[in-house]
Amino acid sequence: MFYREAGQFKTSYQDDQAIFPILQDKVAVLALVAFAYVIPFFANEYWLQAILIQFLVFALAAIGLNLLMGYAGQVSLGTGAFMAVGGYACYKLTTNIEGMNVIVAILLSGGITAAVGILFGLPSLRIKGFYLAVATLAAQFFILWLFNKVGWFVNDNPSGTVTAPPREVFGVLVSGAQATPEARYWTCLTFLVIFAWIATNLVRGRIGRSWMAIRDMDIAAEIIGIRPLRTKLTAFAISSFYCGVAGALMVFCWLGSVETEAFDLFNVSFPVLFMIIIGGLGSIGGSILGAAFIVLMPIFLVNFPPMIGIDIATDFQKHIEEIIFGALIIFFLIVEPEGFARLWQILREKLRTWPFPY
Amino acid sequence: MHFRKLVLAAAGVAIGAGTLMAAPEKAGAAEQFIPMLVYRTGPYAPSGIPVANGFRDYYTLLNKRDGGINGVTVTFEECETKYNTKLGVECYEKLKNKGPTGASLVNPYSTGITYQLIPKSAVDGVPLLTMGYGRTSAADGRVFKWVFNPPATYWSQASAVIKYISRRVGGYDKLQGKKIVHLHHNSAYGKEANPTLEILAKRYGYELTLIAVDHPGQEQASQWRQIRRLKPDFVFMSGWGVMNQVAIKEAAGIRYPMDQFIGNWWSGSDADVVPAGDGSKGYLSTTFHSPGAGFGVHADIVKHVYGGDEAAAKENKLGEVLYNRALVNAMYATEAIRTAQGKYGNKSLTGEQVRWGLENLNITEARLKELGMDGMVRPIKISCADHETMGPVAIQQWDGSQWNLKPEWLTPMRDIVRPLVEADAAQFAKENKITPRSC
């Protein structure tokens, strides 16, 4: 009734190729983005600082990994390492170059991460699937070891932690402890919106299609004229760029101060992998939904029992949370192996015919 | 079908989120809220559980025995961090505004979380009490107005350990050419003692080898192979959680002499030595309070908190080293609140007011006697310039069934450590554009 595309005629190719060709989609997404921008006016500091910024950072990283895994079919467990490269690069750029704008630094650190990603993507030309996952796992361990070992990366700080210095954008502090949660939130949100938009366009275009061709059958793709070297490496580069930007935002806008432990396999790489599996491989919206699930669900599970007045011991509560969280993941994967993105698609189809299904 | 499920799920999440958003604030009764960042799960639980229990029992004791601090009830809430910095920050944000006046002070019990909270705490006006851990240079109160790390820091401790080793080998001149290994957790915490050990190595001519153990520390075979090859005269360890027991088991495995193996004060609790059985007999560690359950405060806890049930108290780690440390820490915190009440009145105090209490904290021998902690811990007097006090360090030894304190208390080398602290604090002040206070 409300969600019907009948009568929406496209009179130009440009209209036909719009990201959201259906008016209702367009309105819904724009409304959602607008809503995201006004959240700081009524959410409290805990929500912004501890939950929503974390969600935005992970959503960006999940989009990055989804470009690589979901679209180009290259399995990677090195997300944490690539985010660490972004975070540490941004720290070095802002502290060692006087007057460096923090936005420029974040973008540059994305570029540096892309270069590192290409380097560690090279094995993908010879090895595939699980074997490639192991090769990227090497990146994960090697890069974190390097940052922990070599003092230059942390400006020879004896504790080995990097602390985001206070930096301004247009006269508003966006990093450092003095920056308001609102400013940090808007910075991360803007990055996410812009990069999600770019990613959506990328995967609809030539690059995205060549990635998907490689993913579906690389020999066939080669025969129709797609160069595996270039395609796989662009996938690694662009994916790493996204992860690098997410890592820089993680250090500068969310945590403020990190050691390498914050980027380790179980803290970052696996959760981001689960985000895209649960959200839906090969879907930008799915990455965001998956990040929301993986970030928000544990926090919800921890806070829920006290909310309804159930007082249980802290350790028991944590264990229960882990059990329920694990069970939910299995449940969703059984109900819909293709992730939230597919559920969303089903919902849309139902909505189209509602209230008169055939 | 899918549609209905989805709507139900969405509604459920929305209701849940709604309740989360509208967390009701409690009415302003006379109570003082202290957040507790604990870790009762994960690889650091062996260390985290006795600490968490100690805090809980001490606050409960105050409420049950004295009716709070001068009539102001102590309220507290635990939040599980798993010793993970991300969860730590989430817990801090969640708890910092609870209670009628917000968090009185925060004990993060993690050096990593402390590093993250140092800049935040100054903005939020919540003092950090990092007793014997955290950022060493926070001892300079002129720069780190909001951070307190009594009674001694990692650097003070390292200098005291070198002092102890010099006693063992027969003087500072005998340190020349001795081989000392620093086996440390590969994190901000573990690395903290390195600069001091390096400076002292230059001064006294011992050979220092730094060996790192990665989080969480369950796998140390290669490190101990290296130690076996090196044959060091002493091994100094900065470990935490499961890393400690694994290291002690490995050391016992290569028959490394236990009385040449010295843990720092986070590597010397009961849970660390018991798993190695007889192999850990003779293991040494530093400390700044007595072990055991024989003090007045323990008797009171058994009586008021456990209703006389000693077995239940023991079950909850009563008298273990880290349990006692938590009692000392909770005592510092509540005495600081009491000190602040002396100035601001017996009501719910803000973080700013508690900070004043911490800075003017003066716990005398007589006061310790009243608290049932005389002989357990040393008196302490914090000042505006010195947030550490560089209290003396004791050495304790495990005899196979309990910890025994060695009689001599070692004073840290103030002439070496303090200039390093001031230099590092000045660097921090410069980087973060802080003007040091004049004290």
Image: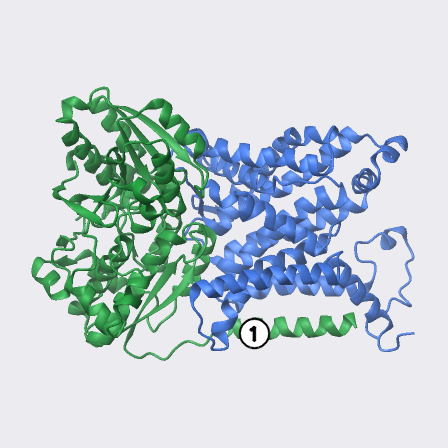
Chain colours: A blue, B green
* Viewer can see residue B386: no
The disc numbered 1 marks a residue on which chain?
B
Q: Is residue A132 above or below residue A332?
A: above
Residue drawn at (63%, 62%) of the image: A327
Residue drawn at (24%, 36%) of the image: B158
- Where's residue A35, x and y in %? 63, 65
- Where's residue A46, x and y in %? 47, 63
Structural crowding at the residue carrying mark 1, measured as other residues with C-alpha within 10 Å and reported as few (<14), some (14–19) or many (≥20):
few
Identify the residue at the far front of this view: B278
Q: Is residue A16 above or below residue A104?
A: below
Q: Is residue A223 left or right of residue A303?
A: right
* Viewer can see residue A102: yes
Q: Quadrant of residue B103?
A: bottom left
Quarter of the figure that contains the N terminus of chain B: bottom right
Identify the residue at the far left of this view: B366
Q: Which residue is mark 1?
A: B18
Circle 1 SS class: helix
The amino acid at mark 1 is Gly
- Where's residue B19, x and y in %? 53, 75
Q: Exactly how many numbered labels are in the figure?
A: 1
Residue drawn at (83%, 62%) of the image: A22
Given residues A192 and A116, the one toward you in this image is A116
Q: Is residue B377 left or right of residue B349?
A: left
- Where's residue B321, x and y in %? 26, 53
Q: Is residue A345 left or right of residue B312?
A: right
